[in-house]
Image (cartoon, rainbow, N blue to C red):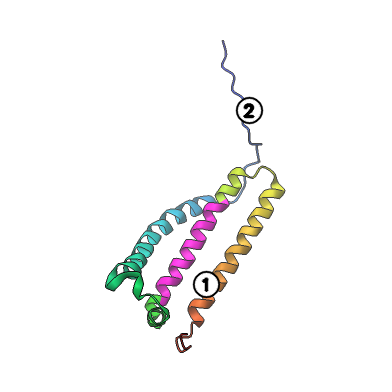
Amino acid sequence: MTLALDKPRSPRRPAARRGNFEMISWLFMRISGLALIVLVLGHLFIMNILDGGVHRINFAFVAGRWSSPFWQFWDLAMLWLAEIHGGNGLRTVINDYARKDSTRFWLKIMLYVSMVLILALGSYVIFTFDATIPAN
């Protein structure tokens, strides 16, 4: 008696010749995940627990925070790492579940365009924030 296995559901694609991109991507996910734990938990602790919690967060608080290059860098690092980490994870999901090459291509294009727009807009806001605007 021989044991027969069914063919896999997903169509076979030729192995991509990308060098070490997937290994570097895998390594980035682990390192950025650890960095994001520190950045996000620090952010939540400072913004929500210290000195009265969320009731003190207003325009003046953000203006004072972003007047320091340290906090600008902290928030910028959190934005960039979270966006690239999430985009890389979504890229992997697209590669795993999109069956047609054309669908995979367009989903990745939409992902990359949205990532660039969010990173550009977020970075622009952090760097050009004007604390002298009167709060209404």
Q: Is residue 60 magenta?
A: no
> Residue at the spot x=57%, y=13% of the render?
2
What amino acid is at disc 2?
A: Lys
Residue 112 visible? The answer is yes
- Residue 23 in the image: x percent, y percent? 50, 50
- Farthest residue, direction top: 1
Q: Which residue is mark 1?
A: 122
What amino acid is at disc 1?
A: Gly
> Residue at the spot x=72%, y=49% of the render?
102
Q: Spatial distance from mark 1 to mark 2, Cα to Cα?
A: 46 Å
- Residue 1 in the image: x percent, y percent? 56, 10
Query: Magenta part of the protein: which range?
Result: 72-91
- Mark 2: give few (<14), some (14-19) or many (20+) Cα within 10 Å: few
Left or right: residue 88 compared with residue 30: right
Left or right: residue 119 compared with residue 36: right
Q: Nearer the viewer, mark 1 or mark 2?
A: 1
- Residue 99 in the image: x percent, y percent? 66, 42
Left or right: residue 11 compared with residue 91: right
Local secondary structure at mark 2: loop
Q: Is residue 76 magenta?
A: yes
Depicted 73 relative to depicted 30: above or below: below
- Mark 1: give few (<14), some (14-19) or many (20+) Cα within 10 Å: some
Using the image as rendered, state which of residue 132 and residue 122 is in the foreground: 132
Local secondary structure at mark 1: helix
Using the image as rendered, state which of residue 38 and residue 11 is in the foreground: 38
- Does the magenta stretch mainly form a helix, a strand or a loop? helix
Circle number at residue 7 = 2
Depicted 136 relative to depicted 10: above or below: below
